[in-house]
Image (tube, rainbow, N blue to C red):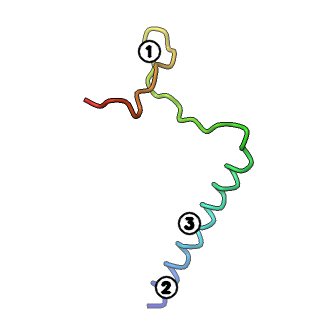
Amino acid sequence: MKTLIFVLVATMVCLSLLMAGLGIKILCHRSKSFRRPCTNADPKTGRCAHCTCGKNKF
């Protein structure tokens, strides 16, 4: 039982540190926007094609 509690507490501590780190990162880069990199590339030109996220799906 003590092992289970230790594992749960350790997990909660790790998750809270990760969330705090993400929050600090967002606060430090406030002027920049976080964009998802486009994974659709035109094979002919190598340029990034328009992303279709959130548009009509099938």
Image position of 33 with respect to 1: above or below: above
Image position of 19 with respect to 3: above or below: above
- Lower sequence index among marks 1 and 2: 2
Callout 2 secondary element: helix
Label 1: few (<14), some or many (≥20) within 10 Å?
few
Residue 23: percent from the left, percent from the top? 66, 56
Corner quadrant of residue 19: bottom right
The residue indicated by pointer 2 is: 5
What amino acid is labelled 1 in the image? Asp
- Horizontal side of 50 relative to 15 (left or right) equals left
Image position of 39 with respect to 22: above or below: above
Q: Nearer the viewer, residue 31 or 15?
A: 31
Label 2: few (<14), some or many (≥20) within 10 Å?
few
- Lower sequence index among marks 1 and 3: 3
Q: Nearer the viewer, mark 2 or mark 3?
A: 3
Callout 1 secondary element: loop
Residue contact at pointers 1 and 3, CB within 8 angstroms: no
The residue lying furthest to the front in this view is 56
Disc on res. 42: 1
At x 53% / y 32%, what residue is drawn?
A: 37
Query: How far apart, in angstroms, are the residues tagged by discs 1 and 2?
Result: 52 Å
